Image (cartoon, rainbow, N blue to C red):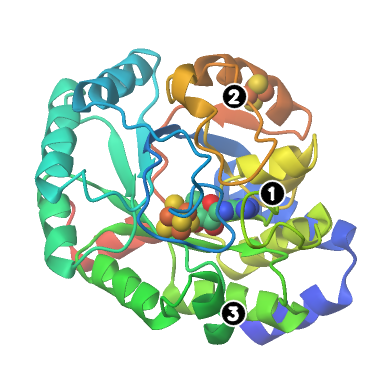
């Protein structure tokens, strides 16, 4: 189907029909495998003030923490010993973690894991030169959601930061050879169905390797506290649309979906998601990384979650995989450029 045909199909189909299509793609392309990523939330300091986010700078009620460099590296080692092959290091926009520190952490991790793991960073907008240094240190992938494709809504929600700047960062990352991830929240205030469709089309135009989406959940200590909570169904429908538009992209079933609905992640997996990200941040810190309220899995270790997830994926006919799980789009780009190193 062309992208126009896919959008048309999306508009005229029930959620069950969309899920049917997504299931077919996941079975053929991924043999129903679900890749695992160990998520480490290494700092909840942030100098930005996104209106939707619970750890925004202006929220004085947040107990701020930073993992030490050693704690970050040790946490990866723990995951590596338990067979995880991909790690995502996420934080707010925290200048304490200078590029020098980040590069040191990346290099150490690569060393102690015999270069066997894929490393993803998710710590916001940086200059192209900084991204280059991070890449040179051995970082494989970078995540930075565009949040919404609507320019006006974007600069309102991000407290004045433009969508253009975000897209510039994504473009820089792609040029530098990263496996690139982005995505958006679903059900933001003033978001229309057309904006959601445009969000999906922007993912398509960017040719993303990884797409993270999840429901917007109003946080009581933010300016958006009185916004309405949209249903999980919108996120499920978007997941299926993205799977149809970008069959080669990795799409996580996100914790926000599991927070909004007890079977939100399973529903996302049915609708085309093929990645899960157990949160292996040491449990003492987990409760302080609350972008939205009622976040699940705060008392469990990420390793306990893996056991839980293995049962959950089974209920929707899928199975966990401990492979690196590079995105198919990234692998074909590498082959095409003849650069296999
Ligand atoms: N509800 C849901 N998702 C949120 N994020 C931030 N705040 C919220 C919220 N209130 C998402 C953003 C960000 C990602 C790390 O978490 O999309 O990029
Ligand atoms: Fe900071 Fe990211 Fe939250 Fe914005 S969404 S306030 S950049 S942690
Ligand atoms: Fe964390 Fe079930 S996935 S406890």
Left or right of 84 on screen, residue 60: right
As measured in the structure, the alpha-carbon distance from the residue carrying label 2 to the one carrying label 1 is 18 Å
First in sequence: mark 2 or mark 1? 1
Residue 227 percent coordinates (x, y):
76, 63
Q: Where, quadrant-wise, is the N terminus in this rendering? A: bottom right
Between circles 1 and 3, the one closer to the viewer is 1
Between circles 2 and 1, the one closer to the viewer is 1
Q: Secondary structure at mark 1?
A: loop
Note whether residue 250 is visible: no
Residue occupied by mark 1: 220
As measured in the structure, the alpha-carbon distance from the residue carrying label 2 to the one carrying label 3 is 31 Å
In the rendered image, the vertical position of residue 98 relative to residue 279, given as above or below: below
First in sequence: mark 1 or mark 3? 3
First in sequence: mark 2 or mark 3? 3
Residue 209 percent coordinates (x, y):
43, 60
Residue occupied by mark 3: 153
- The residue under the point 37% across, 19% down is 79
> Which class describes the residues within 10 Å of circle 3: few (<14), some (14-19), or many (20+)?
many
Most extreme residue toward the front, as rendered?
60
Q: Secondary structure at mark 3?
A: helix
């Amino acid at each position: 189907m062309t992208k126009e045909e896919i959008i048309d199909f999306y508009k005229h189909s029930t959620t069950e029909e969309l899920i049917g299509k997504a299931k077919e793609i996941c079975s053929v392309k991924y043999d129903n495998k679900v890749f695992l990523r160990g998520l480490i939330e290494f700092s909840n300091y942030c100098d930005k003030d996104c209106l939707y986010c619970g750890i925004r700078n202006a929220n004085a009620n947040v107990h701020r923490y930073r993992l030490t460099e050693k704690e970050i590296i040790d946490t990866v080692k723990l995951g590596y010993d338990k067979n995880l092959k991909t790690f995502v290091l996420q934080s707010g926009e925290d200048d304490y973690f200078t590029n020098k520190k980040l590069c040191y952490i990346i290099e150490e991790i690569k060393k102690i894991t015999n270069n066997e793991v894929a490393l993803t960073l998710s710590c916001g907008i940086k200059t192209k030169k900084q991204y280059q240094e991070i890449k040179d240190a051995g970082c494989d992938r970078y995540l930075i959601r565009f949040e919404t494709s609507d320019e006006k809504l974007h600069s309102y929600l991000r407290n004045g930061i433009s969508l253009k700047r975000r897209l510039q960062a994504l473009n820089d990352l792609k040029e530098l050879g990263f496996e690139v991830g982005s995505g958006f929240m679903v059900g933001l205030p003033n978001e229309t169905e057309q904006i959601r469709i445009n969000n999906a089309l922007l993912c398509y135009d960017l040719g993303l390797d990884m797409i993270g989406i999840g429901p917007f959940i109003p946080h009581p200590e933010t300016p958006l506290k009185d916004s309405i909570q949209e249903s999980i169904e919108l996120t499920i429908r978007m997941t299926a649309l993205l799977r149809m538009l970008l069959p080669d992209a990795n799409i996580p079933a996100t914790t926000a979906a599991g927070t909004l609905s007890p079977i939100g992640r399973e529903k996302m997996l049915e609708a085309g998601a093929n990645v899960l990200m157990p949160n292996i941040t040491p449990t003492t810190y987990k409760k302080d990384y609350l972008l939205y309220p009622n976040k699940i899995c705060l008392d469990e270790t990420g390793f306990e979650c893996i056991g839980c997830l293995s049962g959950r994926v089974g209920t929707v006919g899928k199975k966990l995989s401990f492979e690196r799980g590079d995105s198919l789009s990234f692998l074909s780009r590498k082959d095409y450029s003849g650069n296999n190193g």
